[in-house]
Amino acid sequence: MSSPTPWIKASKSASNNDCVEMRRNGQTVEVRDSKDPNGSVLRFTPAELDAWLDGARKGEFDHLGLP
């Protein structure tokens, strides 16, 4: 098994801690809250992440954002 990649977060949140971080770990993509690096980690297959990213690109989750 390969070593996990470093955690990364969006450049928009580089100056604060209000974002999620992601990394590749073996055959999964892991996601965690940057404010709680020792907290829970969600794990997704590449296909699951691809499906979510496709929906995000199409604006399917835009209604969940703050006004």
Image (tube, rainbow, N blue to C red):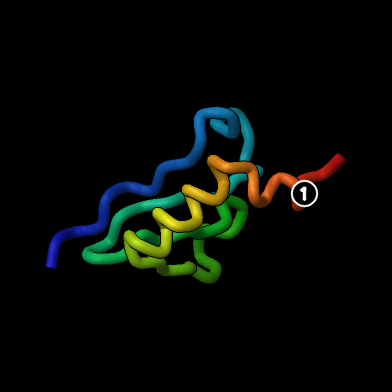
Residue 55, image x, y percentages:
55, 51
Residue 18, image x, y percentages:
65, 43
Taking 15 as reference, is 45 left or right?
left
Residue 38, image x, y percentages:
51, 65
Quadrant housing residue 67: top right
Q: Secondary structure at mark 1?
A: helix
Q: Residue furthest left?
A: 1
Q: Residue at x 41, y 68 (%)?
A: 43
Q: Residue at x 51, y 36 (%)?
A: 10
Taking 23 as reference, is 36 left or right?
right
Nearest the eye: 21 or 47: 47
Neighbourhood count class around disc 1 (C-alpha, 10 Å): few under 14, some 14–19, many 20 upward: few
Nearest the eye: 16 or 11: 11
Quadrant housing residue 66: top right
Q: Is residue 21 above or below residue 47?
A: above
Nearest the eye: 54 or 36: 54
Taking 5 as reference, is 14 left or right?
right
Q: Is residue 8 above or below residue 29?
A: above
Quarter of the image that includes the N terminus: bottom left
Marks counted in the figure total: 1
Tell me the residue that label 1 is attached to. 63
Residue 47, image x, y percentages:
35, 62
Q: Residue at x 71, y 45 (%)?
A: 62
Q: Residue furthest right?
A: 67
Q: Amino acid at mark 1?
A: His
Q: Residue at x 51, y 29 (%)?
A: 11
